[in-house]
Amino acid sequence: MVIGGRKMYIKLWQNTHFEKIDYYETIQEAVNRLISIGDALMVIRRDGTLYNLLSQSDMEFLKTYDPNKRLIEILDPTDSFLFDDDLVEDALVIMLDNRVKVLPVVDSELYPVGTFGFFELLKAFKTISAMDEAGTRAIIKIKDEPGELNKVLSVFAQEKINVLSLMTAKISENKRMVSLKLGIKDINKISEILEDQEIEYEGIYEEDKSR
């Protein structure tokens, strides 16, 4: 995913404030820490690399074990994690495939550098969709064929109108819906352009910066 020439790397959105616990600590200590911080807890090996991640939803699972057992006795090394140079869509795929709400983020040597959850995903989507920029959003329909989207973008390029964000979704066998956030606050001008070019659209909405 590329927005405004920048790839949407996980490291742009990850939460870098996290706490760690050694995998030789007891389950009781992990439960106490989870209650204390109210957030996810990074489980690390003795060398400081990632072993696993405990979230608030793991609390009941932990309480089914002898509280004096060590974490390494009940947890396996996780394979559900992100590198900080992974893309936002990578996080979404892993979350959906593994049905988890938060993932650990590591550097190239597997040292924890942050966490990435639904809140971070929403923050990324806010920027990706240009919700934090003033402009006009146009919802249009195009044929689902190569070159059709480029025709639309060329129209706005000729009019010197900047495209702040672009998202598409297939809505039928041969149609695709496109949401364009444009760097201009003028609904009438956008509608005139679309009608002159015979581009089908469902709606045009002026958007202020979201708070």
Image: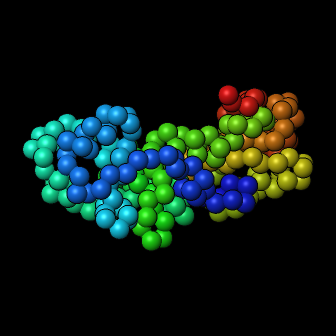
Left or right side of 35 for 19: right
Q: Position of residue 193 (x, y in %)?
A: 85, 41
Looking at this rendering, what residue extends furthest in the right direction?
159
- Labels in figure, total: 0
Q: Residue 102 or 38: which is nearer the viewer?
A: 38
- Residue beneath the point at 31% across and 65% down: 46
- Residue beneath the point at 48% across and 57% down: 113
Q: Residue 4 or 202: which is nearer the viewer?
A: 4
Does 7 appear above or below 58?
Answer: below
Does 177 appear above or below 22?
Answer: above
The answer to whether one can see residue 75 in this image is: no
Q: Position of residue 6 (x, y in %)?
A: 69, 59
Q: Residue 23 or 92: which is nearer the viewer?
A: 23
Looking at this rendering, what residue extends furthest in the left direction?
66
Scheme of colours in the image: rainbow
**Quadrant occupied by the N terminus:** bottom right
Q: Residue 185 or 8: which is nearer the viewer?
A: 8
- Residue beneath the point at 30% across and 56% down: 22
Left or right side of 67 for 16: right
Q: Position of residue 197 (x, y in %)?
A: 82, 46
Which quadrant would residue 48 be assigned to in this image?
bottom left
**Quadrant occupied by the C terminus:** top right
The answer to whether one can see residue 120 in this image is: yes
- Residue beneath the point at 78% across and 42% down: 182
Left or right side of 175 for 36: left
Q: Position of residue 131 (x, y in %)?
A: 67, 37
